[in-house]
Image: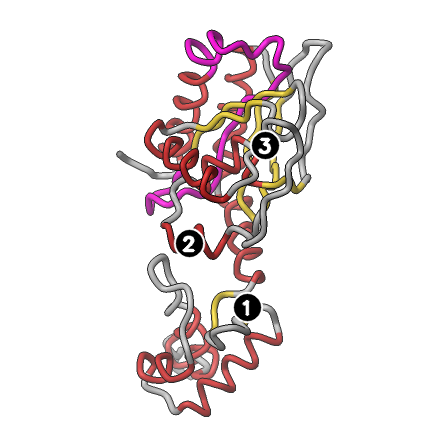
Amino acid sequence: MAKKEKSEYIIQAVDHALDLLEQFHDEVDELGVTELSKRLKLHKNNVFRLLATLESRGYIEQNRVTENYRLGLKTLELGQTFIKQMGLLRQSRPILEALVRECNETTYVSILKEFHIVYLDVVETDLTVRVVPRVGSRLPAYCTAAGKVQLAYMTEEELDNFLPTKELKRYTPSTISGRDELKVDLKKVAELGYAIDNEELDIGVRCVAAPIRDYTRRIIGAVSISGPSMRFTEERMENELIPMVKRAGEDISAKLGYHK
């Protein structure tokens, strides 16, 4: 028997489902059945059945207010798995280790998940007084340097959808709990290219972070340096730690194919 081309084995329903998922991208976060029907050139009934199937598996979810559809958390989990397996951790580890040798403070790589950051990897300092490692922990994004440096590059609309409508929880006297105040702080972060957590989550702990981008120029994570406030003086952060973490972010991004 003659060998068939792989295109002959394509399952049409699966192909349509993937086409549907690909309609959601950076500039399009929600779509209705009618719009999807026009884009995919499929009958509304077929689109609804595709949506129902994907929604049952967590790849699509419905906004109960607008009744439109958006990507579900399962797509985020797949993307994070890809990042872990295909580069972020592998490429960042040597740079984290070099950072620790240079400044002897604990360094992290983290990603944004929902309204939290998740630390994927850490290299610890050998100093006795140190920050407790938080690999796998979910921490609020708005009061951590690694979280703020990823929130800062969202559009106004994305941020409005991302932030809860109620006042943000205050963890310390330094926590920014107002939405408008946070937006001002995030704008400054975007301009500077780095973020600082000045005892905003834990009293006595400071942190500096820079974004990590991939070859598509999207921010996919953050690299950070964290430690006790007594060692993280304003002078040291300004002259030593901030330049280090920005350079580390650029180095990891370059390894992932990002070019300015």
- Residue drawn at x 63%, y 30% is 201
Q: Which residue is mark 3?
A: 175
Residue 136 percent coordinates (x, y): 67, 40
Q: In front: 139, or 77?
A: 139
- Numbered disc 2: secondary structure: helix
Q: Is residue 47 above or below residue 174?
A: below
Give the CA separation, mark 2 to mark 3. Answer: 22 Å
What amino acid is at disc 1? Tyr
Give the CA separation, mark 1 to mark 3. Answer: 34 Å
Q: Which residue is mark 2?
A: 158
Q: Which residue is mark 1?
A: 59
Check if residue 233 falls in the magenta segment: yes
Q: In front: 158, or 9?
A: 158
* Res. 254 mark: none
- Residue drawn at x 44%, y 18% is 242
Residue 84 percent coordinates (x, y): 55, 44
Nearest to viewer (mark 1 / mark 2): 2
Q: Residues within 10 Å of mark 2 (few under 14, many from 20)?
A: some
Which of the 4 image quarters holds residue 251? top left
Which of the 4 image quarters holds residue 218? top left
Q: Residues within 10 Å of mark 3 (few under 14, many from 20)?
A: many
